[in-house]
Amino acid sequence: GLVDGLAAPSDPLRLPDVAPLTARGVAEEPVSVLLPEHHPLSRRAGLRLGDLVDARWIDAPGTGLPLPQLRAANGTSGFRPALRYDGTDLRTLAALAAAGHGLALLPRSAAEEAPGTVAVPLTAPRVVHRTELLYAGALRGPAAVLAAQLDVTRS
């Protein structure tokens, strides 16, 4: 299976201990805060997560990074949702952010594609959006093909 979430650069994701699984990194990229174009913070070169604890957030666990992960990354409470979006369409999440319903934290590549918004890099804490391949036992089938492709692209 593939899992994703926030982690320190080059650190594995913190996952519940459900079985003897092996994790293999698939991708890692910086994250950005998705703001409406005319938001007062939209012209900043970077934002600190701790400065956004009391901001209005969109809780979109199927599309953006879940608010509990933001709380864990910042080591504090806060990050209360102004709105919950249970869908998985990134364009809808971006439209909600563009309309001022709240902020979202997304991988940089996804945030930069969102019309009506500005993607401001998260500068502290240093976290990335990481995707990992999880498997039990020997790699076989599609997981083995994916792992082989990863080895080719890293060479």
Image (spheres, rainbow, N blue to C red):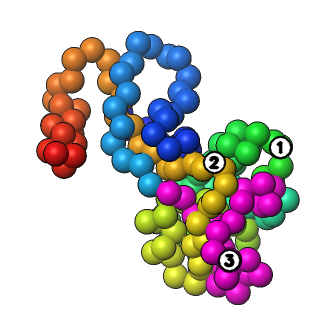
Using the numbered discs, state the Cα–Cα distance from disc 1 to disc 3 in whole angstroms: 24 Å
Residue range highlighted in magenta: 30-53
Q: Is residue 122 visible?
A: yes
Label 1, secondary structure: give it.
loop
* 140, above or below 6, in the image: above
| Position in image of residue 132 (x %, y %) | 39, 37
Q: Magenta span has 11?
A: no
Q: Which dot marks residue 44?
A: 3
Of 30 and 70, the residue lying toward us:
30
Q: Is residue 151 above or below residue 21?
A: below
Quadrant containing the C terminus is: top left
**Which residue carries the number 1 mark?**
77
Determine if residue 86 is in view: no
The residue indicated by pointer 2 is: 66
Residue 120 image offset from top left, x and y in percent: 61, 71
Quarter holding residue 3: top left
Q: Amino acid at mark 2?
A: Pro
**Which residue sits furthest bottom?**
38
